Image: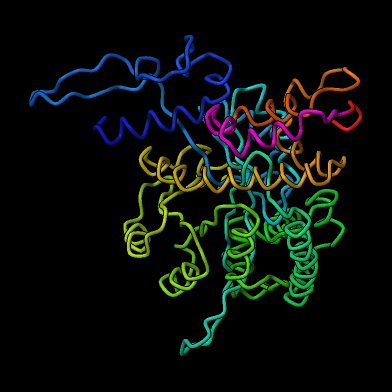
Amino acid sequence: MTLEQTVAYKAVSDWVFLDQSNSGAGAGGGGGSNNNNSGIFVDAFLDDFGVQWYQPKEKLVFEFHSHTTCSDGFLSPTKLVERAHHKGVKVLALTDHDTMSGIPEAMDAARRFGIKIIPGVEISTIFHSRGDSSGAEEPVHILAYYSSCGPTKAALLEKFLGDIQEGRFLRAKNIVAKLHKLKLPVKWETVSKIAGKGVAPGRLHIARALLEAGHVENLKQAFSRYLHDGGPAYSTGSEPVAEEAVKLIRETGGVAVLAHPWALKNPALIIRRLKDAGLHGLEAYRSDGKLSVYSDLADAHDLLKLGGSDYHGRGGPHESDLGSASVPVTMVHEFLKMARPIWRNAILEILENYIKDPSDSNLQHIIKFGRTKAAKTNLPICNANELINNCLSSWLSKEERENAEFETIKSTMGDLVVHAESI
C-alpha cells in the first residue's frame, strides 16, 4: 500500500469497525480504540527503493448497489446479507428500486454476520433533454445513501417513493398490454405473484413471466427483444424529473449518486445537469474494472467515483456477484469524507425532532434502521439516551457523539424514558 492508500485504509477501517472501537475493541480484535496501525496492518516492509509499505490484515469489501425481493431481486434481505457475508463484504448498501422496506430486515440479519448496512434506495426518474436538439427523454436511476437513522423528512420521501411505485404498477400493466398486442400473452396474476405481495412489478418480473410462458429462452432475451428502453413493449411510468430526485435526496440527508451512467444515451449532458442540481457522485467502477470515460467525467465535474455489482441474485454467468466491483479504498475514503458530515447532520436533525416531539412515531424514526440487541430487552422502560447511543454506536464515533451539539441533546433527553412496547 502507498502512503495515500494506508491513510485511506486506516480511516475507512475505523468507520467500518466503529461498533468495536466504541466498545473498547479495535478492528483487529484487540483492546483499545485502534488509534494506531498495529491493529489493522501486518508489519511494514521496505521495497528495493527503501520505500515503506503496509499490508492490511484483511480486505475491506464495500458493496454499494444491490437488490432484494422487496423490488426486483431474487433473494430476501436476510439471504442477501448472508450471501454478502460469504463473499467477504464488510459494508452493504441495500438499494432496492423505489423502496426502503427491506432495510430493517437486512439490519437484523447484518448484526448476526458483523456486516454494516448503509440504508439506500435506487430512485427511478426521467431526464428531459430540454434545450437539446433531440428534445429526447430517457430513464435515469439515482442511488441515495442514508445514515443508520434513515432519511430526515421520512414522510416526504415515503410519499415521493410511493408515487413512483404507483406509477410502476401502471407501467407494468401497460407493458403487459403491449405484450398481448405482440401476441405474447402473460397473465397479470402471474406477474403479481412473481413480484410478491406489496411489491410494485418491474420489467424483471415481467421478463420472468415471459420465460415461464415460454415466449423467450432466457431473461436476457426478454430484455433484448421486448423490454429494453425504447423496445416494442417498453413503457414509462410516472417517474419524477431526475433533478427533483437529486434535490430531494439532499434535502432528506442523503448522498446522491448516478447509477450505471454507461446505460445512458447522453451521459455528458445528464451528468452536467445533475451536478448543477446537487449530485454528489456517479458509478465509475464495475466488476470488470474502472470505466475511464466515466471516471474522467466524474473528475471533470468534481464528483465522487463509486460502483457496485447491481446484484439481483438471478444467477448465471452474466451476473456480477456481490463485492465484485472493487472500488479502491481511496475512493471509499473520499465517499465517507463527504457522506459522514451529511449523515451526522441528518442524525442531529432527527434527534432534535424527537426532542421537540418525543412521540412513538419519532422514536421509531430513530430506531427503525438502527435497532440493536440492547433495544430488544424485556425491560419495561429504558433511558432514551442509552437506547439512542446503542443505535448510533456503529455509525458515529465517540468523538462525534460527544461534541457540544450531541451533548446538548443528551442533557435534554436525560429524563426521557422509553417503554418497551415502543421499541
Query: Could you tell me if residue 306 is visible in this image?
Result: yes
Residue 324: x %, y % from top left: 46, 39
Residue 338: x %, y % from top left: 46, 48
- On screen, residue 142 versus residue 413, left or right, reads left
Residue at position x 52%, y 42% in the image: 340
As rendered, which of 60 and 409 lies closer to the eye? 409
Residue at position x 60%, y 23% in the image: 114
Residue 242: x %, y % from top left: 59, 69
Query: Could you tell me if residue 313 is visible in this image?
Result: no
As rendered, which of 216 and 371 lies closer to the eye? 371
Q: Is residue 32 above or below residue 205?
A: above
Q: Is residue 163 above or below residue 343?
A: below
| Quadrant of the image occupied by residue 295 | bottom left
- On screen, residue 166 versus residue 214, left or right, reads right
- Bounds of the magenta span? 395-418
- On screen, residue 104 versus residue 62, left or right, reads right
Q: Is residue 367 above or below residue 167?
A: above
Does the magenta-highlighted stretch encompass residue 407? yes
As rendered, which of 226 and 96 lies closer to the eye? 96
